[in-house]
Amino acid sequence: MRETKPEFINIPKSQMEEAFRQILLRHGFPSAKAATCAAIFTENSIDGVYTHGVNRFSRFVKYTQQGHILPEKEAVLKQAAGCIEQWDGQSAAGPLNALQCTERVMEIAGVQGMGCVALAHTNHWMRGGTYGWKAAKEGFVFIGWTNTTANMPTWGAMDNKLGNNPLVIAVPHEGEAIVLDMAMSQYSYGALDFYELKKQQLPVPGGFTKDGVLTTDPSAIRESQRILPIGYWKGSGLSLLLDIVATLLSGGLSTAGVSQQKAETSVSQVFMAIDLKRLGNYKTMAASLQQILDDYHASRPDGNSRVIFPGERVLATREENTKNGIPVLKKVWDEIQQL
């Protein structure tokens, strides 16, 4: 029997954002919070990160319905020590907490040159790159990461003890940014979901089957729950250290602690910012960065594809989706309409 090809529809930015805002208002979000959260989900989708934008919105609403996300709460300061602060997310919406902490860490860096905010008891921040783009476009180097529930086996193990703990590094560039936004697994679970919805194989192996065979089949990886750490043992080790540092700095839960929750809630996150304007070589930074990128782009490509830096494709996707509308699986949009 022939498989039906997934149907996509294009949704204009304004229509998507307003639909999200109205749904969030109906589920208890105050007006300003609903508007900001709707904008974040929409911008993630415009930039082509559908797995943490439109495709993730229904789950975000369901977590709110189940009481894991508290719409009226927001992060509060617990402890300050020089350029480092500890905040409690109070189970508020993850994207709003992350945005608040990003803005705060830029304030600290603007005064002290460098700042760090560690956040406990928060929810999924959706696309971590959102906060890297924001900080970098305002002139700051940004480094941030989050722990997650245990969803990845350490290298050489069968069961999940690590989170795939996404890491973001962002640098200002010509009014935009160079942004690395990556999980410690070869593919995030959101990406696996997206490939499953499109009925496609992964471009490269992303995990193991139940029999321990590397595979590009997202369904098989979902079934085994054995996603592949980036760089094998290296990604495994990096995941562990990100979890340790986030836990110690925030005073919140580790991946092991998050995994004891009923859902992926009460995660720990770290936000760091550096104010480049405070450094002695600030005036020559643009030229130095351009020299690096010119050499990078001079790479001889393997095939017809152009060599691009992290985040470079986002700019083209943003332009296309703003002009033509955001491509959404009809099945996903229909589900959102029922919320």
Image (spheres, grey):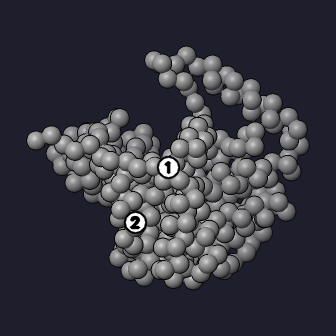
- Residue 315: % across, % down: 61, 40
How far apart, in angstroms, are the residues tagged by discs 1 and 2? 15 Å
What's the amino acid at mark 2? Ile
Q: Nearer the viewer, residue 205 or 229?
A: 205
Q: Is residue 245 above or below residue 63?
A: above
Label 1: element kind: strand
Q: Is residue 318 above or below residue 115?
A: above
- Residue 223: % across, % down: 22, 54
For the point 39% across and 54% down, the residue is 190
Label 2: element kind: helix
What's the amino acid at mark 1? Ile
- Residue 158: % across, % down: 25, 53
For the point 82% across and 56% down, the residue is 113
Number of marks in the rendered image = 2
For the point 51% across and 83% down, the residue is 28
Quadrant where the image shows the C terminus: bottom left
Q: Is residue 111 visible?
A: yes
Drawn side of residue 211 relative to residue 23, left or right: left
Q: Are marks 1 and 2 in contact (CB under 8 Å)?
A: no
Which numbered marker is on residue 336? 2
Q: Nearer the viewer, residue 79 or 187?
A: 187
Q: Estimate how packed mark 2 is, as few (under 14), some (14 to 19) or many (20 or more) residues with alpha carbons within 10 Å.
A: some
**First of labels 1, 2 by sequence position:** 1
For the point 58% across and 30% down, the residue is 308
Quarter location, residue 257: bottom left
Drawn side of residue 308 relative to residue 136, left or right: left
Q: Nearer the viewer, residue 200 or 133?
A: 200
Q: Estimate how packed mark 1 is, as few (under 14), some (14 to 19) or many (20 or more) residues with alpha carbons within 10 Å.
A: many
Which numbered marker is on residue 326? 1
- Residue 301: % across, % down: 52, 19
Quadrant where the image shows the N terminus: top left
Q: Is residue 247 visible?
A: no
